[in-house]
Amino acid sequence: MSENPMALTGQQVELGIARFLEAYPAARREVDDLDEALATSIGMELTDLRQQHALELMDKTAKGRGVSTMVFMLEFALDTQEERSRFLEKLEEAHRRAVGL
C-alpha cells in the first residue's frame, strides 16, 4: 500500500480504472475516442486526459448507483471483499480520530 494508508496507490488506481473500463464498454469507447489533437488543444498529455475522463465517468456511474466514488473505486481497485472492508475500516477509524471520537 502507499505511504498514506488511507490512499490507494497509483498502481491500484490504474488497475481500478482499467477494470472499470472493462466492465463498462460504453465508457471504454468514450475514453478511447479522446485523441491527441484534443489533448494538445487543452495542454494535456493524452494518457492524462484519458485517465481524468475515466475517473469522471467512474464518479458519474457511482453517483448513478447511489454509492460514493471511493467505495465504487474500491470495487475495481482491490481484489477481495476482505481488502475492501479492511481499507474502509481504516478510513473510518482515521475519520473518527480526525473528528475526536
Image (cartoon, grey):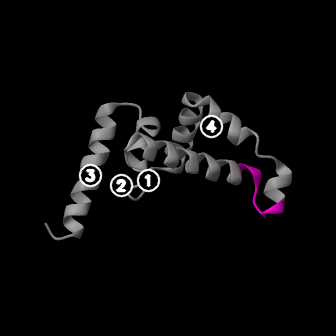
In the rendered structure, which segment of residues is drawn in magenta?
41-47
* Contact? badges 1 and 4 (CB < 8 Å): no
Which residue is found at the position 39% from the left and 59% from the top?
A: 4
> Pointers 1 and 2 in contact (CB under 8 A)?
yes
Q: What element carries label 2?
A: loop
Residue nearest the observer in this picture, 65 or 37:
65
Q: Label 4 sits on what residue type?
A: Ala
Q: Is residue 66 above or below residue 28?
A: below
Quadrant in the rendering for residue 45: bottom right
In this picture, residue 8 sits left or right of residue 86: right
Q: On the image, numbered disc 2 is attached to which residue?
A: 5
Using the image as rendered, state which of residue 66 and residue 95 is in the foreground.
66
Q: State the CA–CA distance, disc 2 to disc 3.
A: 8 Å
Q: Which amino acid does label 1 sit on?
A: Ser
Label 1 to label 2: alpha-carbon separation: 6 Å
Q: Name the residue under label 1.
A: 2
